[in-house]
Image (spheres, rainbow, N blue to C red):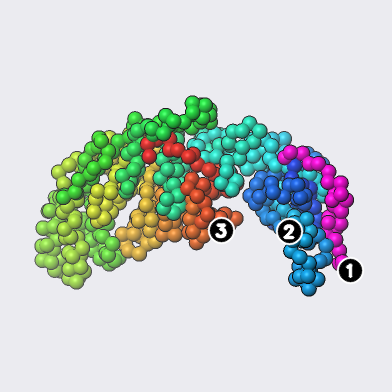
Amino acid sequence: MSEFDLERELGLEFTRPAKPELGEEELGRIAISSELSLSLTEAKIEMYVPESRRDRVAVGEYVVIPCDYAGGKIFARIKKLSYRKRDALDDMSEVHLLVGAERVGEEEYIELAELEPLSMIVQGKALEVRHIPKPNTIVRRVASEDEVKVGLDLPEDGLFLGYVAVNGEPIRLSSGLPIPYYLRNDPERTGDPLIFTHTLIAGMSGRGKTHVAKNFLRQLVGSRYRMERRGGEEREVNLIILDPHNEYWQMMEDNPVLETIPAKELDILRGQGVKFGGVKGVRVFAAKEEGRRYQGAPKYLEFTVPFALVRQFPYLIAGGEVNEEQFGALVLLVRDFFASGGERYQEFKEFVEGAEERYKAGLIHSETLKALKRRVLRPYFERIFDQGANPLDQLYEEIFAEGAVSVFPTEHLSPEAERVVVLAIMSMVADAKTEAVEAEWGKRIARFPVVLVVDEAHNYLTNATTQQDRIIVEKFVAAAKQGRKNRLGLVLITQNPQDVNEAVLSQVSTRLLLGMEEGQAERAGAPKEYQKALPYFERGRMVVHSPENSHPLELRGLEFCLVRH
């Protein structure tokens, strides 16, 4: 004796013999297994999937539910798929065990899809879902690009990031073309361009971070933005790229692969506003360290970090071991050194070596002074400061220029020298964008919109453990907060998002997340519905989470790089 027949409860008991035909894109009907409900905080909307459509539905797909009485249609996503018993036969009962497995097929069950409403499309606009669909309403796949763009609130244009995808495959509708996804970039239509609310590109090694980053940065080249604090003048963006793996200089060259791409496909990219090809404005600046030589770009300009920058940034010689008390003493030493007329590291070395006599009155405790000596007189400082090449602070006109892409490769440097170089460049940009720097380089940086790209960002904007770390993090949190106003954008690239300081991450509004472990995904700010899936994302497949731009969704990046890679 059966308790009830679920299919009868759904009002579908006569569909089995009749099996009415569904249209090509129709997947099923709205059903009621327990309830059909919609509230301000949650929804329970289910679709009955007939046997003829069971192999054609997958979690994550986008569907449309007509809601004619409300004058629109609900745009939704398949959130969950489940089988339910067709009758009261208990799968665990002795009776069921006696039935041969070959005699209990899929037809003994019904399939239901739980739908997550994302928006209500009314007269071409996306609104909040306030109306509930009627039972038995036919549910279909999205049928047009407009439905996807309106339903997901996608920008019409901007900086190209990839194609809207489901389960790793770009959505292709009746036209056969994929749907491009853009980051809003037009200040006249969207307010502040989102590049100045900062971007994170994160993923495990081998998942395509650099490929994605190069394609994204290629779109930025040539963008012009209004400088709000300089009378509204419009200036072209200047890209500053910190390149630890000697890869980004290749942006100056065409990718040979582009020659193999069919002309029709390239025309489609052009029609979608995608920029490709080598960038003439790329300039490479390689730091000089004694005993080491840069080998990478065919053309580059060598520079040195002048010790004079320590006047502005004392922490450049603090190292990773100086505590708060020692740092206070170091600031005093640096101040007094420059006040005495000193400029170079060798002079500072002599100044520190004679400091015990100078500070015997107790301004600096003798033990503190001894600890500082051990830290600021290390050999690697002699190999990186004042190396006879172009001083970094004198190259500001070449580095900071409209339309320029200034690349700083650091792979050839020792770890200690690399840190000094990277922190010097980062600090110059941050200070010039957050305070009135009197030096000419500071005035120059303030004139242009600047996007600072920090690869391996977890090495520099890390969870603060030393005084140097804390100062850098505080500096960049302040710079990030003023990014919109001062036209400073940060692009942070990392394979260890869990090691990037949380205060810095909290200022990032756009996150491009490639394959990564579940714990990393949570730390990187991935939406909950994607956290378990991200470990399985293959190369080039990503999630974009940008609340000011669109609903969270999946993207598929281009298979090829738009510049040499």
Instruction: Give the image quarter of residue 250.
Output: top left
Residue 147 shows up from this direction: yes
**Is residue 68 shown left or right of residue 181?**
right
* x and y, in percent, of residue 310 in the image: 23, 52
Q: CA distance from mark 1 to mark 3?
A: 42 Å
At mark 3, the secondary structure is: loop
Between residues 166 and 363, which one lies in front from this camera angle? Answer: 166
Vertical arrangement, residue 135 with respect to residue 449, above or below: below
Residue 440 shows up from this direction: no
Residue at image coords 49%, 59% = 517
- Give the residues drawn in magenta, as a range: 1-25
Residue 532: which disc?
3
* Mark in the foreground, 1 or 3: 1
* Mark in the foreground, 1 or 2: 1
Whichever of callouts 1 and 2 sits on the residue coming sooner in the sequence is: 1
**Is residue 113 shown left or right of residue 353?**
right
Between residues 277 and 408, which one lies in front from this camera angle? Answer: 277
Q: CA distance from mark 1 to mark 2?
A: 22 Å
Residue at image coords 60%, 46% = 166
Residue 1: which disc?
1
Residue beneath disc 2: 83
Which quadrant is home to the N terminus? bottom right
Residue at image coords 59%, 33% = 177
Instruction: Give the image quarter of residue 75.
Output: top right
At mark 2, the secondary structure is: strand
Between residues 364 and 468, which one lies in front from this camera angle? Answer: 468
For mark 3, does the 10 Å Cα neighbourhood hold few (<14), some (14 to 19), or many (20 or more) residues? some
* x and y, in percent, of residue 35 in the image: 80, 58
Q: CA distance from mark 3 to mark 2?
A: 22 Å
